[in-house]
Image (spheres, rainbow, N blue to C red):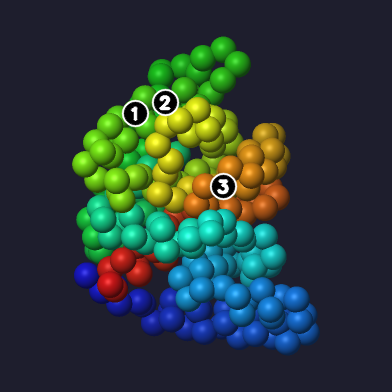
Amino acid sequence: MAVLDHPIFTASIALIRQELAARGASDPALAARLQCLSPLERDVLERCIHSSGDPSLVDVLCFGSALGACEQGLAALEAGAPILCDTAMAAAAVAPMARRTRGNRVLCLLDWAPATAPPGSTRSAAAVEPAWSALTAALTDRPGAAPVVLIGSAPTALERLLDLVAAGAPAPSLLIGMPVGFVGVAESKRHLAASGLAQIRLEGSRGGAGLVAAACNALLRAAGDS
């Protein structure tokens, strides 16, 4: 179902476009980078800037996949892929758009987490393997609907998922990897960048539930329009 944007959101996007155009006019490298973005990538960028109030995200938002990460994520959402979030906050931010568009299931990784963190690990990391096994068990019947994964808070969960996929587990249709903070965050994002997976990520220490949800909501909105 098509989504009608609120006039305030529409006005905000217009201002964001003006800001990016002004920056591009004085920075040829930025202008060239913006020119190379697909319409769907541009939507993700604009919604992330709107969510954060930070136009400088244009300098650190990265898309990775030879086939087009956003396009792969959109195709999976259109095929009914579930959306796995690392926090309840991210899930709560995505669920309303999912309901208004394709009705994709939105799940929280912590539903599979143990009550206490294992020694040397975290609850989020410990939840990855059982969650991933449960969500990918039926993929032989629906190969185009592997989960879309949102990680905005837990670099340990991102690392664990990357390890599972490297060991032969099914890959996500799209991994939106934007863990926030300073411990293990940069390393996990570097590993994601090197993984070859379809991905949307933020370089550096920025990230969070609001930003992964914003990126996913841009794709859900496109799915609703298709």
Earlier-in-chain disc, 2 versus 3: 2
Q: Which residue is mark 1?
A: 133
User: At 41% across and 58% down in the image, what residue appears?
Assistant: 72
Asked if disc 2 and disc 1 are in contact, CB closer than 8 Å, the reply is yes
- Three-letter residue code for mark 3: Gly
The residue lying toward the viewer, choosing from 123 and 76, is 76
Q: From the top left corner, tell me how far across and down residue 32 is, in percent.
A: 69, 78
Residue at horizontal 22 percent and vertical 70 percent from the top: 1
CA gap, disc 3 to disc 1?
21 Å
Q: Is residue 39 above or below residue 180?
A: below
Residue at the top extreme, as displayed? 119
Going by the image, does 177 lie left or right of 110? right
User: Could you say whether the residue bearing mark 2 is in a helix, strand or loop?
Assistant: helix
Measured in 3D between alpha carbons, the distance from the residue under mark 2 to the one under mark 1, in whole angstroms, is 6 Å
Looking at the image, residue 30 lies above or below residue 52? below
Residue ID for mark 3:
196
